[in-house]
């Protein structure tokens, strides 16, 4: 039995359809417009939404757009229903992210068949992702310049250098991506290039074609290569990108911007562990603490988080002061080293360029800790 939300402003149709769907064995909730629908979804997540297009207050297009923009509902199957069966409407419906479009007057058997197909697809997908064993590790920070990208890339290279794992870096900095520069690569295509494709055509192979490989074996997936195209990288696209990467990799290291966007939250949802990176200065620590607090609110298990202090400058607060601030001992403290800048300007990861450097050794330790928190293996 599935829980279906049906949204329509006409009472008669609501009655007709809810009776029919209930007889089909589904549990049905009703809403009269987009706002009511969003409220109902917040109180209980349905398995599928059927929505009319023309409704007062918030129509079906806007409802679908909002569902797709939120990491919690981006994957919710949506069937659009409308009397307006002009080609334009159908196209708009699909563009907003509807999975199916059914014309009014409704052919009940057609609608029922489409519902069954969508529900089966969701179940198959849930089963498939459970089986796909690659681990996703998010590097997060709340204040730029903490060395997040530097540590994400160097950790990925350290993991790949062990020759035990297939490793990818997924760069979620949409406006100003730079992870690829640390390994002197220039991806020709990015996730944004897939934005115009039918989502059903985005498979493992399509995502693999976007990857560029570094000498260590690390594959880099860039999300976007021009600030003005950032909006093409939607939440569902990020979810698909990460899903396909984890299908073919042992570790997917996600580099994120210092924002709390739906795209970053989508990565957090998919993650097996999170490294929160801060500099040993108050503003950066405060941002790191905010991250830890919000993860706690999301019931993210504390034992799957790592507090990483990165001494990007000389000086800064002492480790015990930091421990008091976080009410928790930092798991890793990366020492200050001028060779980080040198390495990045040369497009070589520090862990390779200066394998014996003290900071490089600590980054390798960070990589090792992550393999304990989130062991590879399928
Ligand atoms: N431990 C460190 N010691 C010295 N410089 C560092 C260290 N870690 C990172 N850096 C430098 O700090 C700068 C910011 O790093 P970056 O990774 O771009 O930060 P973020 O992604 O958090 O904005 C870079 O110039 C980088 O080389
Ligand atoms: Mg960065």
Image (cartoon, rainbow, N blue to C red):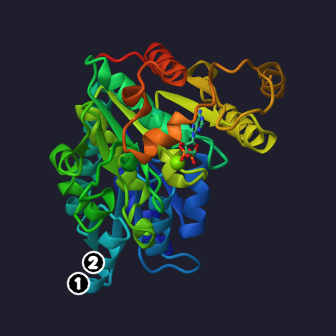
Q: What element carries label 2?
A: helix
Location of residue 47 with respect to 275 vertically, above or below: below
Residue 53 x/y as whole percent: 41, 76
Q: Is residue 5 visible?
A: yes
For mark 1, does the 10 Å Cα neighbourhood hold few (<14), some (14 to 19), or many (20 or more) residues?
A: few
Position of residue 156 in the picture relative to residue 370 (left or right): left
Residue 216 lies in what quarter of the image?
A: top left
Q: Nearer the viewer, residue 26 or 267?
A: 267
Q: How far apart are marks 1 and 2 (CA)?
A: 6 Å
Q: Identify the mark at residue 87; answer none if there is no mark.
A: 1
Quarter holding ligand 1: top right
Q: Which mark is residue 50?
A: none
Q: Where is residue 262 in the image (x, y as percent from the top left)?
A: 53, 53
Dividing the picture into quadrants, the one containing residue 177 is: bottom left
Residue 168, above or below 361: below
The quadrant of the image that shows the N terminus is top left
Residue visible at 44% across and 43% down in the picture: 344
Q: Are marks 1 and 2 in contact (CB under 8 Å)?
A: yes
Residue drawn at (27%, 64%) of the image: 193
Q: Seen from this angle, which residue lies furthest top?
A: 372
Q: Position of residue 326 (x, y in %)?
A: 78, 27
**Going 62% across and 58% down the picture, which residue do you hit?**
39
Which image quadrant: the C terminus? top left
Secondary structure at numbered mark 1: helix
Between residue 360 and residue 50, name the one nearer to us. 360
Up-down relation of residue 344 to residue 21 (above or below): above
x 53%, y 46%: residue: 265
**Tag of residue 91:** 2
- The answer to whether any part of residue 32 appears in the image is no
């Amino acid at each position: 039995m599935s829980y279906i939300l049906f949204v329509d402003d006409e009472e008669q149709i609501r009655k007709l359809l809810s009776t029919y769907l209930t007889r089909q064995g589904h549990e049905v909730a009703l809403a009269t417009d987009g706002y009511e629908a969003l409220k109902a979804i917040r109180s209980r997540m349905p398995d599928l939404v059927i929505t009319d297009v023309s409704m007062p207050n918030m129509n079906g297009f806007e409802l679908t757009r909002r569902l797709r923009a939120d990491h919690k509902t981006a994957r919710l199957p949506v069937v659009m229903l409308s009397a307006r069966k002009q080609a334009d409407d159908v196209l708009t419906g699909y563009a907003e992210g509807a999975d199916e479009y059914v014309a009014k007057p409704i052919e009940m058997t057609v609608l029922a068949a489409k519902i069954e197909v969508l529900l089966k697809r969701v179940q198959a997908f849930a089963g498939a992702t459970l089986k796909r064993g690659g681990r996703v590790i998010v590097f997060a920070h709340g204040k730029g310049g903490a060395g997040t990208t530097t540590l994400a890339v160097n950790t990925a290279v350290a993991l790949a250098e062990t020759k035990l794992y297939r490793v990818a870096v997924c760069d979620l900095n949409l406006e100003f991506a730079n992870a690829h520069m640390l390994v002197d690569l220039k991806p020709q295509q990015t996730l944004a290039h897939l934005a115009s494709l039918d989502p059903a055509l985005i498979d493992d192979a399509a995502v693999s074609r976007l990857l560029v490989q570094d000498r260590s074996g690390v594959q880099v997936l860039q999300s976007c290569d021009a600030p003005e195209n950032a909006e093409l990288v939607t939440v569902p696209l990020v979810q698909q990108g990460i899903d396909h990467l984890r299908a073919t990799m042992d570790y997917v290291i996600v580099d994120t911007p210092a924002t709390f966007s739906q795209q970053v939250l989508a990565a957090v949802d998919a993650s097996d562990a999170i490294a929160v990176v801060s500099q040993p200065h108050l503003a950066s620590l405060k941002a790191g603490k905010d991250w830890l607090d919000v993860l706690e609110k999301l019931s993210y298990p504390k034992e799957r988080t790592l507090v990483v202090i990165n001494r990007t400058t000389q000086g800064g607060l002492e480790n015990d002061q930091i421990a008091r601030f976080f009410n928790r001992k930092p798991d890793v403290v990366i020492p200050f080293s001028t060779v980080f800048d040198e390495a990045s300007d040369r497009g070589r990861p520090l862990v390779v360029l200066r394998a014996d450097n003290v900071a490089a050794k600590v980054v390798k330790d960070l990589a090792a800790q992550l393999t304990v928190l989130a062991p590879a293996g399928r």
